[in-house]
């Protein structure tokens, strides 16, 4: 009985994580306080109910696939080949945040280049079009992928577990962090604090505006967490900063009304 529960745990955790971390922002921004946050809205208008349902259905599929990949590694002999460690004393305490950061950087790199590949005309309609049906995305769109893209996205799990020494709890924290950032990217509202624009973090990190531009234009802003690859490869939208500042000005102006 205990083994059955442990096998189902990754599935349950992934589903709860999705509905909790996507559902709460959706409830706040789209149901309870859309008027209050109107100044933060990136695109005018709201997606339709059928769009939300589509996003949820595909995201649940992706959640199941990611859980299946994790279970295949954690509950089979493949576990022996991972770099997961269980004793916290195996590595110094500072390695915990470093391993999480390395996992995030590895995921961002993998995501950027995978994203570029699936935007190729010969692949796009067969694989990535499902995600881009969310032209005006909501938090529910965070995992809204075609089956084949879901499998490709799930490959970050073995990449991290086989390459980076990481405690299982650190890996869990990593999955929580990346999902929160993913939801923020698809939120449809810009909620970064106003000081963020003038900090060095703006030069490094993506924003909701950054990823939203990818959904509305399709041809730029392929990174998920950082601006590094887009800036190096010249794929950042030329109007990104202007669009971000426009929303910032709107937010500031509204706060004084």
Image (cartoon, rainbow, N blue to C red):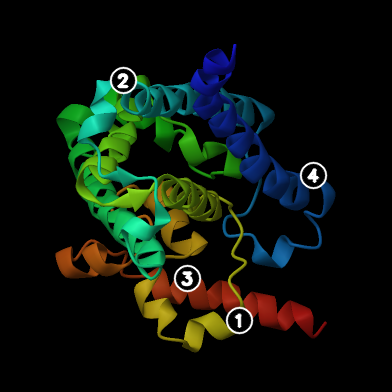
Q: Quadrant of the N terminus?
A: top right
From the image, tell me which residue sits under label 3.
243
Q: CA gap, disc 2 to disc 3?
A: 48 Å
Q: CA gap, disc 2 to disc 4?
A: 43 Å
In terms of depth relative to the viewer, which is nearer, 3 or 246?
Answer: 3
In terms of depth relative to the viewer, which is nearer, 206 or 210?
Answer: 206
Q: Return the x and y of residue 42 as percentages of the image width and height.
A: 57, 60
Please identify the quarter of the rendering in which residue 14 is found: top right
Q: CA gap, disc 4 to disc 1?
A: 24 Å
Would you place residue 154 above or below residue 85 in this image? above
Classify residue 15 as left or right of residue 232.
right
Q: CA gap, disc 3 to disc 4?
A: 25 Å
| Residue at x-position 47% and y-position 35% | 143
Q: Tag 4 or tag 3, which sits nearer the N-term?
A: 4
From the image, tell me which residue sits under label 4.
31
Q: Tag 1 or tag 3, which sits nearer the N-term?
A: 1
In terms of depth relative to the viewer, which is nearer, 134 or 64?
Answer: 64
Q: Which callout, 3 or 1, points to the residue nearer the camera?
A: 1
Q: Which callout, 2 or 1, points to the residue nearer the camera?
A: 2
- What SS does tag 2 mark? loop
From the image, tell me which residue sits under label 2.
76
Q: Tag 3 or tag 2, which sits nearer the N-term?
A: 2
Q: Quadrant of the C terminus?
A: bottom right
- What SS does tag 3 mark? helix
Q: Which callout, 3 or 4, points to the residue nearer the camera?
A: 4
For the question of whether residue 223 can be seen, the reply is no
From the image, tell me which residue sits under label 1.
194
Q: CA gap, disc 2 to disc 1?
A: 47 Å
Check residue 3 in the rendering and tell me which mark sits there, or answer none: none
């Amino acid at each position: 009985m205990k083994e059955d529960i442990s096998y189902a745990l990754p599935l349950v955790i992934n589903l709860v994580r999705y509905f909790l971390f996507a559902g709460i922002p959706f409830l706040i921004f789209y149901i309870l306080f859309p008027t209050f946050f109107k100044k933060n809205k990136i695109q005018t208008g709201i997606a339709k109910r059928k769009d939300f349902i589509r996003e949820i259905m595909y995201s649940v599929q992706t959640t199941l696939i990611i859980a299946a990949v994790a279970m295949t590694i954690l509950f089979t002999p493949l576990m022996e080949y991972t770099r997961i460690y269980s004793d916290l004393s195996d590595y110094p305490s500072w390695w915990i945040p470093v391993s999480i950061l390395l996992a995030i950087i590895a995921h961002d790199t993998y995501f950027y280049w995978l994203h570029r590949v699936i935007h190729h005309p010969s692949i796009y309609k067969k694989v990535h079009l499902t995600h881009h049906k969310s032209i005006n995305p909501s938090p529910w769109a965070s995992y809204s992928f075609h089956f084949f893209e879901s499998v490709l996205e799930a490959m970050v799990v073995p990449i991290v577990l086989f390459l980076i020494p990481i405690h299982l709890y650190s890996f869990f924290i990593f999955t929580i962090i990346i999902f929160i950032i993913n939801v923020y990217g698809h939120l449809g509202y810009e909620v970064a604090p106003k000081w963020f624009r003038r900090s060095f973090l703006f030069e490094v990190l993506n924003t909701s505006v950054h990823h939203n531009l990818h959904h509305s234009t399709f041809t730029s802003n392929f990174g998920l967490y950082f601006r590094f690859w887009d800036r190096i490869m010249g794929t950042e939208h030329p109007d990104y900063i202007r669009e971000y500042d426009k929303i910032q000005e709107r937010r500031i102006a509204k706060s004084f009304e």
